[in-house]
Amino acid sequence: MKKQWYFGMIVGVVCMGLSLVGGSLSSVGVNAAYAGKSKASKKASKKVKKKVSAAVLKLGKKTYGQLCALCHGAKGHGDGPGAKGLKIKPTAYGKGVFRYGGSFKQIMKSITKGILKNGMASYGWMPMKKRVALVHYIQFLSRQGKKK
């Protein structure tokens, strides 16, 4: 019990520190990418998202390995070594399961704002290019899990 409490406090302090250092993107917002777009434009951007280049997936995989795998596990099963001390286990999106939604927009919101009640830090400080690649890689992991 004590170990869990200390680990939770450490994760919380780190998350808060990252949030304070990185600030927030509330002025830009997750929806900024869709602001002022027509329905046709939104539909076209959804089609583009389905065709993700190998370079984008490679960047997403690298970023995932650096920031996400510790808790979410190498294949996104929520079984990383950092998950052991968390009261609420990380989402197992590698199995096709999303706690807060699996759409591009919903995953981007979780990455950008974080989910502090679950111990997930905000990564709003990360360049948008890396966050977009990360979302695509997470969706890729989810599709791989659904195939099995």
Image (tube, rainbow, N blue to C red):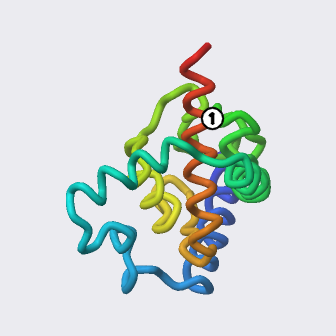
| Figure quadrant of residue 74 | top right
Residue at (57% x, 48% y) in the render: 136
97 left or right, relative to 4: left
Is residue 3 among the parts visible in the rendering? no
- Quadrant including the C terminus: top right
Under circle 1, the secondary element is helix
Q: Position of residue 98 (x, y in %)?
A: 45, 37
Vertical arrangement, residue 146 with respect to residue 137, above or below: above
Q: Position of residue 15 (x, y in %)?
A: 60, 69
- Within-10-Å neighbours for mark 1: few <14, some 14–19, many 20+: many
| Figure quadrant of residue 20 | bottom right
Q: Position of residue 35 (x, y in %)?
A: 28, 73
Vertical arrangement, residue 70 with respect to residue 18, above or below: above
Type of the residue with mark 1: Leu
| Figure quadrant of residue 9 | bottom right
Residue at (47% x, 50% y) in the render: 48
